[in-house]
Amino acid sequence: MLASAFLLAATILVPTVSIAAHTSPEIDHIDPKCPPSTFSGFESNVFQYNVPAERFYNKTGSFFRSEWYTGPLTSTHGTDNTVGATRSGNYSGTFFTERLVGYSRSPDELVMRFTLATPGGVVFSGARIKSYTEEMRVMSICGGSATYFSMTAVFCADKVGKVYDLYDGLRRAAVGAVAEQLGALVFDGTCPATPVNDVLDVDFLLL
């Protein structure tokens, strides 16, 4: 994923916690202990869109078909959306491998968690990232008419502020591009109003 931050420059990370595929999406929180010369970081983004979550599931719910976030991959191993599967890519000379550590999907919620699996970590844009774990959570809200989309990351890096900005920029650009493809609009606060024609008979309105 992080490599994509670099592809699109655009919200959910948690420490590596393995769960069986297609099981409970509940997260056991672990605060990572970072090695010397690196520091703990956390970054999260939340978006709300006025289209059903199923449409976002179809665009973002595959660990292997992740170009929307990671950019083009160079290889994959294992079975898509199954814990233990890995994906690899290369962005501007930075090679990365990520391992899927959690996946669950239901009509109401999709949760995907993955972690950096590159030995020794990666270096990008002047920041050394020793480790990261990310979580993407897509939930159906507003009676199935809208989507809550969050991405969170916890990481160990030597320049926490720079990595925070990379994540934030990547996610805003990546998720925003998917929303644009779907014709989805952001909304804040309560659920989007139901069009009046959906709740009142049109003939009544003409009286």
Image (cartoon, rainbow, N blue to C red):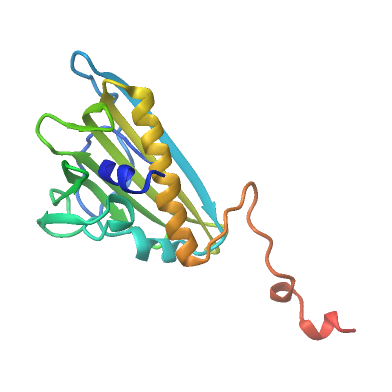
- Residue placed most toward the observer, 53 or 6: 6
Q: Is residue 138 visible?
A: no
Is 68 on the left-hand or right-hand side of 140? left
x and y percentages locating residue 173 in the rendered image: 43, 49
Residue located 70% across and 69% down the image? 195
Residue located 18% across and 59% down the image? 80
Is 127 on the left-hand or right-hand side of 43? left
x and y percentages locating residue 71 in the rendered image: 27, 53
**Which quarter of the image is occupied by the C terminus?**
bottom right
Furthest residue toward front: 92
Furthest residue toward bottom: 203
Considering only vertical position in the picture, is 126 above or below 108?
above
- Residue placed most toward the observer, 82 or 12: 12
Residue 178's quadrant in the figure? bottom left
Furthest residue toward right: 207
Q: Is residue 164 visible?
A: yes
x and y percentages locating residue 122 in the rendered image: 18, 33
Residue located 36% across and 27% down the image? 162
Residue located 31% across and 43% down the image? 6
x and y percentages locating residue 102 in the rendered image: 24, 46
Considering only vertical position in the picture, is 95 above or below 206?
above
**Which quarter of the image is occupied by the N terminus?**
top left
Considering only vertical position in the picture, is 84 above or below 44?
below
Counting labels gives: 0
- Residue placed most toward the observer, 163 or 206: 163
